[in-house]
Amino acid sequence: MKRTGAQVLCEGIISEGVEVIFGFPGGVLLELYDTLPQYPQLRHILVRHEQGAAHAADGYARVTGKVGVCLATSGPGATNLVTGIANAHLDSVPMVAITGQVARAFIGKDAFQETDITGITLPITKHNYLVLNVNELPGIIKEAFFLARSGRPGPVLIDIPKDIFTDQTDVDFPARVELPGYTVVQQGHIAQIEKAARLIGEASRPLILAGHGVLISGASEELRQLAETAQIPVATTLLGLGCFPQTHILSCGMVGMHGIACANKAMDQSDLLIAVGMRFDDRVTGKISAYAQQARVIHIDIDPAEIGKNVKVDVPIVGDVKKVLQALNKMVAAAGHMAWLRQLDDWRRQSPSLDIRDTASLLPQYVVSKIYEVTGGEAIIVTGVGQNQMWAAQHYLYTRPNTLVTSGGLGTMGFGLPAAMGAKVGRPGETVWCIDGDGGLQMTIQELGTIVQEKVAVKIAILNNGYLGMVRQWQELFYGRRYVATPLSCPDFVKIAEAYGIPGSRVTRKEEVVPAIEQAMKHDGPFLIDFMVEPEEGVYPMIPPGAAVAEFIEGPKEEVSAWPQRSIR
Ligand SMILES: Cc1ncc(C[n+]2csc(CCOP(=O)(O)OP(=O)(O)O)c2C)c(N)n1
Ligand SMILES: [Mg+2]
């Protein structure tokens, strides 16, 4: 039966399990938008800016494990997606971005709203397509979804010229995707897995470094089994938080630039790092020449390009984390490691990174810890980027997979609000808190409009320090406290929320924190709280840029105002 390109697209994405599209219309998409009502099972969410569509699709994908879909028109619509696509690319998030393009006859003529979006997104997509024949559209849609979700997930872009939407085809969707040259190794090499088991048996100070790959592969249970069998402590990367319950006795928290002291010391002193679905990002390793000098390294990852990229690996295992851990668990013997675990306990006591100073002023860490308490640790937390992100990572204890949604690789300010919206749309039964900075929120604040129109009950906590806080912290530490272009004026966020139709409150004192969070939770709908926090509070511990993991600074012990300026190196 003949169908238009627009119908093929709708039927194709429905057959791939898509229920929600985050999009924004424009001239070349009119035919597609006119076709959408024929498919009432597809929910279209009209964002206020295409960047919001990409981040919302990203947040949706991270909490559901499904492919997130965003849609934008040609030219400026397409380029507005770019940051969101790059964000998904760096964090391995399955996404299909669909863009309209000018009609084929106009391509290459600098036509109105023409941009070469496949050229622009080539380095930030797993693959992209410009559809030049409607008969190819069914196969391209199948391939795009297959590529986005298979192996190491990532964003795929399909650019569709206006006249393809009206062209007709009777070509069916292919039953299966054939992509010679695209192979994903699922099962790890058995001899390598045996070698890994042997090293684990010999190690006296082993440490598991668990990353986003554990969550993507759904391998939390297998990870827990490995850790418990051989009594190996588990540290996670920022994106790995939630893959191993932080309330577990073997959990030692987040590693990296703002990692917990105990986890960083363990990483520095370990004699065997078992890196699972992580990529030794520079924010994790610090100075690479001083990194984990006593450790042998087992590296399990589905992407062979990650192995040996930053750190020399003794036992590389390419494969799906879940399958590799299943095989490994059959070979690993029960062990104790009592001395090592006692050592970790000592470090925990010596450097209690999570202690919050008892100050008269309102500390952002205090706010996050109260959100943790009031939500019983059961919420999905979506963050902005900067200090707010690090406090949300440090002071909320994540116990379930996919409950922290944060921009790790790209560090995209403006991610928080739209990603929280996407997360809430994907998991409407969960409580979703967006913890953002006053700077980041202002980058995509217009999505409050989408949240209201689409009735998305996101709770928003602004850690309002009046600064681009993380940059200010670097200026404080490394640029003699010269705060150039980091003090930031803000609108009255409560009034802004009110103007959009969202209730809110402002909190300036500690005793108001819990009642405000409770009020937000009780309210049936979105709610915004503007927490006026200590302006010059810093995120600690901190490994200064260029320093080794062991050279972290602990942070202040008293009121910030009583804290003399420190000079680093
Ligand atoms: C799009 C973008 N621009 C610039 C930066 C650099 N940057 C990193 S953190 C930060 C400050 C963020 O300020 P705010 O959102 O208020 O969060 P805070 O650190 O104060 O919690 C900046 C400017 C970035 N990460 N992303
Ligand atoms: Mg700020």
Image (tube, rainbow, N blue to C red):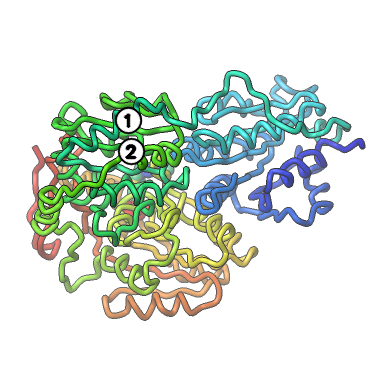
Taking the spot 62% from the left edge, 26% from the top edge, the residue there is 118
Q: Helix or strand or loop: what does disc 2 sit on? A: helix
Q: Helix or strand or loop: what does disc 1 sit on? A: helix
Res. 426 in view: yes
Residue tagged 1:
194
Residue tagged 2:
331
Residue at the right extreme?
1
Taking the spot 41% from the left edge, 67% from the top edge, the residue there is 378
391 relative position to 8: left or right: left
Res. 483 in view: no
Where 127 sits versus 19, above or below?
Answer: above
Where 33 sits versus 165, above or below?
Answer: below
Amino acid type at mark 2 = Met
498 relative position to 541: left or right: right
Q: Residue 507, position in %: x, y?
A: 34, 74
| In-front residue for pair 222/161 | 222
Q: Residue 550, position in %: x, y?
A: 13, 40
Amino acid type at mark 1 = Glu
